[in-house]
Amino acid sequence: MKDWDAYNTTTRARGKELSGLHPELVKGFGALARGAATTQHLDAKTRELIALAVAVTTRCDGCIDAHVRKAKVAGASKAEMAEALGVAIALNAGAAFTYSLHVLDAAGDETAAE
């Protein structure tokens, strides 16, 4: 398993490096994140549970690290996180099912000889 504290420390250091190399990019990313966090109808815990489900579906370790930390601060329990992950798992399975239909469509109407 991953050492998330070490991962966080390393990621923050590399983020500072990127900020030094391309400050406008990092400033824009920060603005996007702040904009997404400014909501009228969703509370912080709900936003973070959604973020965790998206982090899993996009396979983003940095997102998982950041949003687990934020979800805890927002009061999310491990059980609530698990329920959000259930949604992510179901959607990933749904996407695999749907894209499997694309494969069948791409294969055409002919059946291969058995």
Image (spheres, rainbow, N blue to C red):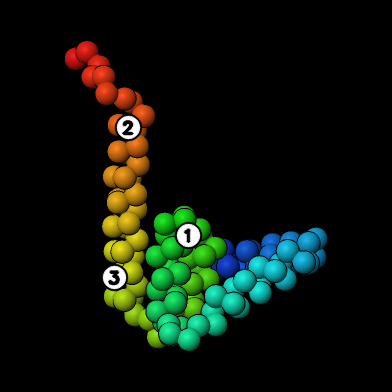
Q: Residues within 10 Å of mark 3 (few under 14, many from 20)?
A: some
Q: What residue is shown at x 30% (from left), y 31% (from top)? A: 104
Residue 34 place in picture, x, y as percent: 60, 78
Residues 34 and 79: in front is: 34
Amino acid type of the residue tagged 3 in the rendering: Glu
Above or below: residue 30 compared with residue 76: above
Q: Tell us which disc is closer to us: 1 or 3.
A: 3
Residues 104 and 21: in front is: 104
Q: Residues within 10 Å of mark 2 (few under 14, many from 20)?
A: few
Q: Which residue, given by chain and number where applicable, does mark 1 sit on? A: 2
Above or below: residue 75 compared with residue 89: below
Q: Are marks 2 and 3 in contact (CB under 8 Å)?
A: no
Above or below: residue 74 compared with residue 19: below
Q: Tell us which disc is closer to us: 2 or 3.
A: 2
**Residue 113 falls left or right of residue 89:** left
Indicate which disc residue 83 carries.
3
Gap in Å between the C-alphas at discs 1 and 3? 22 Å
Q: What secondary structure is marked by label 2?
A: helix
